[in-house]
Image: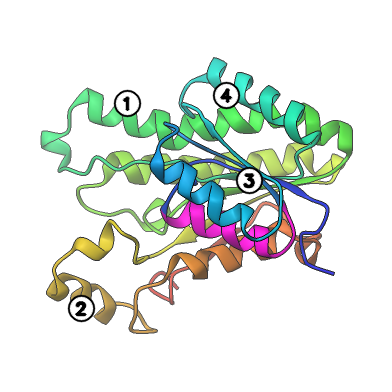
Amino acid sequence: MKLLEGKVALITGAARGIGKAIALKFAQEGAEIAFTDLFRNEAMEMTEKEIAALGVKVKGYASNAADYADTQRVVEEILADFGHIDVLVNNAGITKDTQLKRMTEEQWDSVIAVNLKSVFNFTKAIQPVMWKQNGGSVINMSSVVGVSGNASQCNYSASKAGIIGFTKSAAKEMGVRNIRHNAIAPGFIITEMTNQLPEEVKKAWAETIPMRRGGTPKDVANTATFLASDLSSYITGQVIHCCGGMNC
């Protein structure tokens, strides 16, 4: 039997990148997939087709994860389409990096809203569902910079540190109903965005990592699969570093 057979997973920000890798891996392990992104566009439709080709039910939804009312709406739609939600991956996120002395209020507010408020929005929306089911797994995408900070990322680091505090608190509240909350803290992950960096920059990053390479979206997806499955049934309130040892 596949690890996620019979489960429905909701993954935010999953039309591309790490979110897409998680959705594909979950589908390979038998989960039905509901995923969101800001717009229904070619990227979403392509991801939908790739997941459907694995033989599971899938549907993409346009949703502004930073908007509370819109989140309530999309979760209601997903429940109507799938009947239940067993796994939530809060992956939606943006960066607007700059030094603090140059950072605008808009750059601060938008990153906090998309990265941190979205975690509140979706967790709040699915809590009654998982409470009634007496079980579920919530996986929040943090970052190593949420643990140790990073220059020119005060907004991003604050949002990812906030996710860790939220995760630990929610785990203590909801453990009584067998609802687990864990966070993943990826390090330097090679995605479409980071792959555009100059080779010398990527090489410099790799030299700071004990495993001497950047991670891949698949590395993060494998970690998420463990946390979504019953293999991690007694793990909650934890931050799993997926960073090749760069933050060990």
Q: Nearer the viewer, mark 4 or mark 2?
A: 4
Position of residue 193 relative to residue 116, above or below, is: below
Identify the residue position indicated by label 2 in the image: 203
Please name the residue shown 40% across and 36% down the image.
41
Q: Say which amino acid is labelled 2.
A: Lys
Q: Say which amino acid is labelled 3.
A: Lys
Question: Is 149 placed left or right of 84 in the picture?
Answer: left
Q: Nearer the viewer, residue 179 or 150?
A: 179
Magenta extent: 17-31
Secondary structure of residue under mark 4: helix
Disc 3 packing (10 Å; few <14; some 14–19; many ≥20):
some
Which residue is outermost to the top?
Answer: 69
Q: Say which amino acid is labelled 1.
A: Asp
Question: Is 168 placed left or right of 129 in the picture?
Answer: left
Q: Does the magenta-highlighted stretch encompass residue 20?
A: yes
What quarter of the picture does the N terminus occupy?
Answer: bottom right
Please name the residue shown 46% across and 49% down the image.
46
Residue 168 image label: 3
Q: Nearer the viewer, mark 3 or mark 2?
A: 2
Identify the residue position indicated by label 1 in the image: 109
Identify the residue position indicated by label 4 in the image: 71
